[in-house]
Image: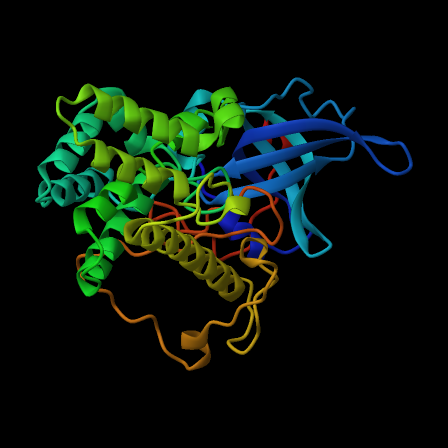
């Protein structure tokens, strides 16, 4: 049973041995500057990721044929190099099936998927534009699309990078769009909401999430914008009498939602709905990144008047949590919106660690020092 999570390790004393169960995202044979071989691993669990290094790969206590996708039990200690936490691996073997649940090893949304899905369908049901409702109903009623949309992460590493993250991101954006649209009479509410639901739909084929999060071959070659536009176009073409003007506007929303050419959009936003979508999408991602950094800074023991580390996802800027500095707790939200959940985003471009608390609230770091495990207990 897994009782120590990666999010717990920042408070562990350096050099103190511990045992942990992890999913292996990568394994590489490397050499030091003095040409000494070592093994480099990227481990993960549902709370984040951790680099591990086995400096003595010939040690018989380290299994040599560990590969990406293996679930392992590792013994080692925490070290820090250039302010980055690492694990010095002293023993490593494959975990037995009964020792750990795979659900403990993949980050996932803290929200109930069925509730998120119900809210998505409720937004679609509120549409007054019948053709857009037809379009979304056809897409969301496809069992393969629906199943993937309920599971997919929103990204490999930057924002909402966890199982169910794409659906969580979409419902969060729908909540924002539903509040913004009435404020601007020039915005077509149902068209904007359609763009919200479809803007990242291509990620269900751009990304894979069986073993960690990665790009598919199709995703690398085409990207989610192209994949999503093609999916939407095929669906609209198959709907009898779908208005050509609406088709053009829906495709423009998907193609322009990154906002700038240098950010990957083949077109700049040229309608009120497309402009609103690009700003709301960017806002939701950046708020999540800020919340993650604030949570990590507090967990690392930084004072309220200290800035965060430089945030790669926010142009290497440092951030200040104004509410914490003022001595305030975050204001309670209204019951309706899906709030961006706190996650950890690394200070450099590697897949982010998940910093939301474990879904099992009973899992906590032991208050007393961990006993030194014996080799027999480990093996």
Q: Quadrant of residue 242?
A: top left
Q: Quadrant of the C terminus?
A: top right
Q: Position of residue 342 (x, y in %)?
A: 40, 56
Q: Quadrant of the N terminus?
A: top left
| Residue 101 visible from this viewpoint | no
At a point 44% along the width and 42% down the height, the residue shown is: 267
- 95 or 349, which is in the foreground? 349
Lateral position of residue 280 relative to residue 239, left or right: right
Lateral position of residue 151 relative to residue 187, left or right: right
Hey, which residue is sitting farthest front in the picture?
A: 245
Q: Quadrant of residue 46?
A: top left
Hey, which residue is sitting farthest right in the picture?
A: 34
| Residue 257 visible from this viewpoint | yes
At a point 33% along the width and 46% down the height, the residue shown is: 169
Lateral position of residue 159 relative to residue 375, left or right: left
Q: Position of residue 73 (x, y in %)?
A: 56, 30
Colour setting: rainbow
Tally of numbered discs: 0
- 106 or 193, which is in the foreground? 193
- 300 or 182, which is in the foreground? 182
At a point 44% along the width and 52% down the height, the residue shown is: 343
Q: Position of residue 124 (x, y in %)?
A: 14, 41
- 203 or 46, which is in the foreground? 203
User: Vertically, is 229 above or below 78?
Assistant: above
Hey, which residue is sitting farthest bottom in the picture?
A: 326
At a point 8% along the width and 44% down the height, the residue shown is: 128
User: Vertically, is 165 above or below 14?
Assistant: above
Q: Position of residue 292 (x, y in %)?
A: 46, 57
């Amino acid at each position: 049973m897994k009782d120590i999570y990666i999010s717990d390790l920042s408070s562990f004393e350096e050099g103190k041995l511990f045992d942990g169960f992890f999913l292996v995202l990568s394994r590489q044979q490397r050499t030091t500057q003095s040409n000494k071989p070592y093994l480099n691993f990227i481990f993960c669990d549902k709370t984040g990721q951790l680099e591990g290094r086995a400096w003595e790969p010939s040690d018989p206590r380290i299994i040599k044929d560990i590969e990406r996708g293996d679930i392992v039990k590792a013994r080692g200690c925490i070290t820090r190099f250039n302010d980055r936490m690492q694990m010095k691996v002293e023993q490593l073997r494959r975990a037995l099936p009964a020792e750990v649940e795979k659900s403990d090893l993949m980050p996932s949304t803290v929200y109930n998927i069925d509730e998120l899905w119900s809210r998505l369908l409720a937004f679609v049901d509120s549409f007054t534009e019948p053709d857009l409702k037809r379009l979304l109903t056809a897409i969301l009623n496809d069992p393969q699309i629906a199943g993937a949309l309920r599971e997919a992460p929103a990204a490999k590493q930057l924002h909402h990078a966890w199982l169910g993250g794409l659906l969580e991101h979409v419902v969060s954006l729908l909540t924002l769009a539903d509040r913004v649209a009435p404020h601007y009479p020039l915005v077509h509410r149902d068209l904007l909401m359609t763009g919200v639901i479809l803007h990242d739909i291509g990620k269900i084929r751009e990304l894979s999430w069986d073993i960690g999060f990665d790009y598919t071959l199709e995703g690398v070659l085409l990207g989610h914008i192209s994949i999503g536009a093609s999916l939407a176009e095929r669906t609209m073409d198959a709907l009898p009498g779908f208005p050509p003007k609406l088709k053009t506007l829906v495709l423009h929303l998907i193609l322009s939602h990154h906002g700038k050419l240098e950010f990957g959009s083949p077109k700049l936003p040229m309608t009120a709905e497309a402009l609103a979508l690009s700003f709301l999408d960017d806002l939701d991602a950046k708020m999540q990144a800020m919340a993650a950094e604030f949570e990590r800074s507090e967990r690392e023991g930084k004072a309220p008047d200290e800035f965060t580390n430089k945030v790669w996802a926010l142009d290497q800027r440092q951030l200040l949590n104004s509410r914490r500095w003022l001595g305030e707790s975050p204001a309670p939200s209204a019951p309706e919106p899906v709030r961006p959940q706190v996650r950890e985003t690394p200070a450099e471009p590697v897949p982010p660690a998940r910093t939301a608390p474990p879904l099992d609230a009973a899992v906590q770091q032991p208050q007393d020092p961990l006993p030194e495990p014996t080799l027999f207990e480990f093996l």
